[in-house]
Amino acid sequence: MTKTLTQSPLTALEAAIKLAQDSPNNDAAHAAFDELYNSVQATDPQMAALLQRLWREYLTTQRSAAFWQELCQVEKHLSERITESHLQLRQSYRRLMEEQSPVTLTHPAQR
């Protein structure tokens, strides 16, 4: 990604962040950040170390957010299935009660 060297550091960082937000582009995001890191490292090693630390924290946050989003989707799906099962059980119970009701009324022991 040779564009990074001609971009401002802020623009290069924004591009790397944008790439990191999309999981399939993680390799491209790392490559973009590495170029930015190397260019900053050449001029200001302390800033580069800080930038690297913040990048790692950002990636960790992204992974955590993706994990929780996936967990929420699984929970939603499970909740929908439980609700569906509950409704089916309720309908089956009503049908059973309706089927047994006439049988109970005509049962010889109740006459």
Image: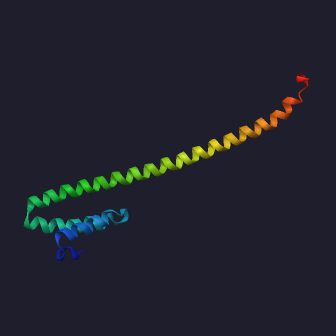
Q: Looking at the rendering, which quadrant does residue 66 occupy? A: bottom left
Tell me if 35 is positioned left or right of 66 in this view: left
The answer to whether residue 2 is seen in the rendering is: no
Please provide percent x and percent y for residue 44: 8, 63
Q: Compared with residue 5, is residue 50 higher up or lower down, i.e. above or below?
A: above
Residue at 63%, 41% in the rendered image: 86
Choose between 65 and 94: the one closer to the eye.
94
Q: Quadrant of the N terminus?
A: bottom left
Left or right: 24 as drawn, with respect to 97? left
The quarter of the rendered structure image containing the C terminus is: top right
Colouring rule applied to residues: rainbow
Q: Does 6 appear above or below 74? A: below
Number of callouts = 0
Where residue 4 appears, as percent x and y from the top left, is 21, 73
Q: Residue at x 17, y 65 (%)?
A: 37
- Tell me: 77 left or right of 47: right
Name the quadrant containing residue 104.
top right
- Location of residue 99 in the rendering, given as x and y in whole percent from the top left corner: 81, 37
Q: Is residue 25 visible?
A: yes
Quarter holding residue 28 = bottom left
Residue 33 screen position, x and y as percent: 22, 65
